[in-house]
Each structure stands twice: as structure tokens, then as C-alpha cells.
Amino acid sequence: MSSRSFRDVRSLAEFVYRESEGNPFYAQEYLRWLIESGAAEIDPRRRISGLKSEILLESALPSGVRALIRARFGGLNEDARELLEVAAVIGRSFDLGLLCRAAGCREIEAFMTMKPLVSSGLIVETQQEKKYHFSHDKLRQALYEDIDDPVRRIMHLRVASALEEGECEPAELAHHYMRAVEWQPALDNLVRAARKAEGSHAWETALKDYGRALEIVEKLPGSEEKKFDLLAARDGLLEHLDRREERAAAVQEMLELANDRGDLERIAEVHIRRIGILMVTDPEEAAESGRAAVDIFREMDNIAGEARAHRELGYARWVSRDYAGALEANLQALWIHRNLGYRRAEAGDASNIAQVYRGTGDYDNALRWAEEAVRIDHELGSRLAEGFKMNTVANIHRERGDLEAALSLHLKSLSMCTYLGIKNLTATQHLNCGRLYLSLAATERALHHFRSAARFGGEVGYTRDEGYALMGTGVCLERGEDPSRAEEAYRRSVGLMEKAYEDSGSQEDLPEERKRCRFLGPCFTTRSTDGPRHSAPMRTPPRHTAG
């Protein structure tokens, strides 16, 4: 049915299959609907030649499909219709117990009503006890859309109340409270869902939940403080995912809210967050935000806040290679934390000072401060922090040329991260181990770690780290005389880099990353056994926080 010039046939096929679920009548009706609505463009030979792709995001019911479904439901008695409407509000799949609690009936009554519906093929009984689902989602959608809005909201509220009686997912509760137009419980459950997603490293899901929560909070009176907290939580995720442009917008909104309320502590908090956004593009402006935060915390006599501002200011100066300024700021933070007795924060300061000395090439002082940071965390029993700071010690050894010592520490840190189940740090440690094994000419071991780094990076959404890991994979495969698979790894690496820099808003850095893979092109024809001698850089080390 498509012209040869039509390039979106796969997208069209996926849409028709998704909506029809393979039912040939539904598939035909959806194609007819796309053509009659003008969403699919037809050439003079009556072939599909174009498509308005935004229509594929919709989930509509063509009139032919709706008429057929209404005919199937036409013979239902009132009890069956009411029960099915509650089921449609619950979702495609539903539990008999939940259905009865929401509908206010006994299980035996619901079971007897369900039997003929199962026999007719409208409802399917699963292998799980008391679990059912609609045989086609369009059946559920048609039922749902035919319920009057006020009745539908009441039914969603009844389902939410029934879910509250047992254990349920906060995201599911949030869905029903939103449909019931009950904004406060919807907001509370969206925040719970976002935090749960964060704990599972499902950061994209958490971002979506926070985004929906920000839409809802506008509907509640006196919500400025809650909105600031939501923006702050979302900004933390955006920083984690290195999305600078989105961060800048969120932080600017936070600054406007804080200024409107005249809240000095929150204004200082925003200034600290601005440092992380500005330190790459405008180091002087970042330093100015750091000084503003210091001044505000001093005015408020908030000593712990002042220490945090010094630390962030030190980080900005470290990034801009102002090592003298970075050392001064981090020593100020260390002095305050030491006087306050904040040992964990002191360990973070010591590690930051080690990074400053490392930047100047003073490896003796760098090693002394880095080992002090590890020692404090070991005394505090903080295995995660200890393993993290061990990386600094390892990197110092690597830069001094002691690759075996560096590898030993990275392997130890990898073991800790694996034991603790922290996938994002596990990905980073595999990447570090792969780089070192590659430098030591242990190609097979390097390949194992690069592949593991790519897998974990993909699982947690670290697109850039996944790209670097694939770059290392390509180098290993090339050295192993497997040029075709090496080329594929490099191609995938470039694609991931493009996505990472697009997400972060730092595309000005991308051409260099493209070159790092594309200059390898000649090796695919010359089969050079020497290969490139580059290694994947680590992402910019995060500053150590007092928490």
C-alpha cells in the first residue's frame, strides 16, 4: 500500500500493530482512519507517500472499531456492564479482589458475572488466581470513554480507595487520584513514585514523575514552597544525568521563586546550584555565585551553609584550573567542618584537596590527602564513600605511572560497588579497570570490563559512559583482529555520544568526540595492529558533599 519513496513504513506498521494488537479488522479500520483523516498522504497512484508522525502518538478509536465494540457490548445486562466499567477504570488487567472492593460487591457475585464474559471472549482469565484482563485494549478504551466524566472521576476515587487498603505502587495510586481530580493525594503519590524510581536507578521515570508533580502543584493553593522542593529534586536528577540546559531552566525558576519570597537561605541554595551550571561556560560568573552564597550564609550566621558554599566555590575554581583559589576555598571548608566535628564532610574536603594537588602535579601531597580521606571514611564505616574516594588514590598512582597499584585499588572499589549493588558506580569502575588493563596490554580482560561498563551504563542511563565503554570495546576488538565488530562498536559509540551531548546541551564538545572514533576509520581497511592509544576519560569528578 506504500510508495517506494515512503520512508516511515516501519513507524506506520508499528502504530497499526500497537493499536490493533493483530486483529485484522481493527488493522484495516486504523488504516482507513489514517487515510480519511488526512494523516496519511496519498499519491496519484493511491499509495501512501507521507505521514503526519504526531498522529502516531494518539490512541484514538476509529468509528468502525467503536461501532463493532458497542455492538459486542449491546447484549450485556446492567450488572455485567457496571462491573466491566469498573474494570475498565482499573486498567487492561485487574484483580478480582480489587474489582470487588471498588465495585462494592462480593467475590462470588463478581465471579458469576464474569463467567459468561470469559466464555464470550471479552475477558480472559489468566493462569494467576483471580487475575483477568480485557481480550483487547480497545474494548477497555471504548467502555472507559463512554462513561460520563463525573461518574468516571468518582469511580477512579473508589479504585484509589480500594488500592489504599492493600500494598500498591504509588505510581498507580497517583494515576487514579489524578483522574479523580484529587490533586493533593495525586501529588503526594507522584513524589513517592519519583523517589522510589530514583532508588531503583530508573532516573528517566523519576524525571517524568517530578515533571507531572510540577504540573499538579500549580493547582494547589500556597504551593510555592513545595514547588521549590520539587524543582530542587528534579535539578538533582538533571545534574546526575548531565543535562545542563534543562538544569539552567530549572535553577532559574528556583531563583525567581526564592527572590519572590525573599527567602535568603533558598537564594543562597540557588546560587550554589548555579555554580555547577556556570562553571564550564562562565567560570567567573560561577565564582561570583559562590561568593554570593558565602556572603548570604555569613549574614545568616549559618556556618555549615558557609562551608558548603566554600566547597562549591572550590569546585568551580578547580574546574577552571584556578588551583590556588580552589585550595584556599577547600581549606576554608575543611577548617569549618573540623571545628563543627563533621567528620564525613571533613573526608570529602580532604579528597577535594587531593584533587587540587593532583591538578598541580604535586602527587606526594595529593596522595597524602587522598589517603587521609579514605582513612576517615573507613573509621566511619562508610563503605560506599571509602570505595568512591579510593578512586582518587588509584588515579594518583596511575598518573605517577604505577598502573598495577592503580588497578588493584580500582578492582577493590569495583568489588565494593558490586557488593552494594550500586550500578552507576559499578559501571564507572568497570570502565576504569578496562582502561588500565588496556594500558597493561591485557586486551581480553579489558574487553570484559568495557563490555560490563557498557551494560551497566545502559541500564542506569549513563549514555556518555556507555559510549566511552563502547569506544574501549572497539579498541580491544581492533587489537584482537576483529575489525568489523570494532567498527560497529565505534559507530554505536558515536551515536551514544551524540545523544549524550544533545541531552546535556554541550554539543560544542561533540566534534572532538566524533574525531576520537572517526580517525580510526583507516584501520578498517589497513588492518593496523598497532591501533590508537587513547583511553576513555572519566566524567568530571563530582564534588564531595557533606551529606
Image: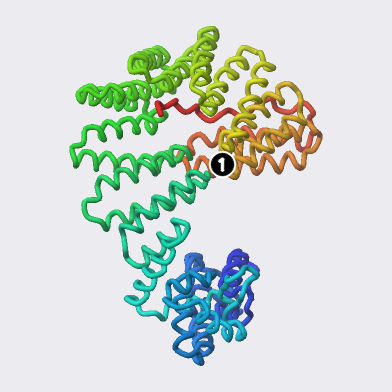
Residue 325 makes an appearance in the image: no
Residue 457, percent from left and from top: 59, 40
Q: Which residue is mark 1?
A: 463
**Of residues 23 and 483, the one drawn nearer to the viewer in this rendering:** 23
Q: Is residue 456 left or right of residue 320?
A: right
Query: The residue under label 1 is which amino acid type?
Result: Thr
The quadrant in which residue 243 appears is top left
At 51% across and 40% down in the image, what residue appears?
501
Q: Residues within 10 Å of mark 1 (few under 14, many from 20)?
A: many
Q: Position of residue 266 (x, y in %)?
A: 26, 35
SS for dot 1: helix
Please tell me in which quadrant of the rendered image residue 217 appears: bottom left
Quadrant of the frame with the N terminus: bottom right
Q: Is residue 439 above or below residue 517?
A: above
- Give x and y (percent) for residue 462: 55, 40
Q: Residue at x 54, y 14 (%)?
A: 371
Q: Is residue 91 above or below residue 116?
A: above
Q: Residue 42: horizontal and vertical position, in percent? A: 55, 76
Q: Is residue 64 left or right of residue 475?
A: left
The C terminus appears in which quarter of the rendering?
top left
The quadrant holding residue 134 is: bottom right
Instruction: Name the residue at the bottom extreme.
Output: 75
Residue occupying image coordinates x 78% and y 30%: 528
When the figure is inspected, residue 173 is found, relative to residue 434, above or below; the finding is below
Q: Nearer the viewer, residue 55 or 522?
A: 55
Q: Nearer the viewer, residue 112 or 63?
A: 112
Colouring of the image = rainbow
Please say whether residue 545 is visible from this viewpoint.
yes
Residue at the image point whose x is 21% and y is 25% from the top: 300
